[in-house]
Image (spheres, rainbow, N blue to C red):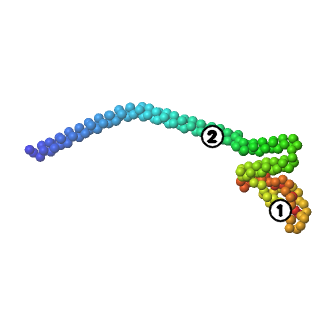
Amino acid sequence: MSKKNKKNQNEEPKVAQEEILNEETVEQNQEQVSEENEDPDKKIAELEAALEHQKKEYMFLFSDFENFRRRTAREKGDLIRNGAEKAMLELLPVVDDLERALDAINKGGDVDSLREGVDLIYNKFVKYLESQHVTAIDSTGKDFDTDLHEAVTMFPAPDPSMKGKIIDTTIKGYMINDKVLRHAKVVVGS
């Protein structure tokens, strides 16, 4: 065999392999083109389904949030309307005692026993206030403090040491949890 024939024999298988590869590539490209032609419709359908799913999820979340908001608003309203219920329930025994005292006064009972009954009612009420963290502001003889006291009038001090101090308390002040509930109305020495 001549070199030329050997060369042609070697080239023939290479050419045949290249033709086969080219045919396979063309077939793959045709498959891809056909898939791509189908793909946009499929893709659109898939995206629309995903969008619809996301819309449903959003609506469920939005609905849950709206229900939560309404429920908390209703609960807050109930708390505001019924917040004083416990306090009022605990005051009812004091009212009952006061009614009994008024009945005793109307029947003309013993003055000393009436006084004792009213003292008991007063002490019961003070204990209730303390249980609610309400305390009286101690004023008489103390330095005047605008955060706790309201000066009703200025009065000449009986002695120089009482200048700027509270001589008398006309209306007692109260605090609740270290916050002034009502300022004490006082007479201040000048």
The residue sitting at 27% across, 37% down in the picture is: 24
Q: Quadrant of residue 104?
A: top right
Q: Residue 100's x, y, as percent?
A: 81, 42
* Inter-mark Cα distance, 2 to 1: 49 Å
Instruction: Name the element at disc 1.
Output: loop
- Mark 1, residue position: 141
Q: Looking at the image, which is closer to me, 81 or 140?
A: 140
Q: Quadrant of residue 156?
A: bottom right
Q: Looking at the image, which is closer to me, 187 or 88?
A: 88
Q: Is residue 168 left or right of residue 7?
A: right
Q: Residue 86's x, y, as percent?
A: 70, 43
The residue sitting at 81% across, 57% down in the picture is: 149
Q: Is residue 124 visible?
A: yes
Quadrant containing the C terminus is: bottom right
Numbered marks: total: 2
- Mark 2, residue position: 72
Q: Is residue 163 left or right of residue 77?
A: right
Instruction: Name the element at disc 2.
Output: helix
Q: Looking at the image, which is closer to me, 85 or 63?
A: 85
Residue type at tag 1:
Gly
The residue sitting at 81% across, 62% down in the picture is: 142
Quadrant containing the N terminus is: top left
Q: Residue 71's x, y, as percent?
A: 62, 38
Q: From what the image shows, is residue 174 above or below residue 1?
A: below
- Classify mark 2: residues with Cα within 10 Å, few (<14), some (14-19) or many (20+): few
Q: Residue 128's x, y, as percent?
A: 74, 49
Q: Is residue 44 visible?
A: no
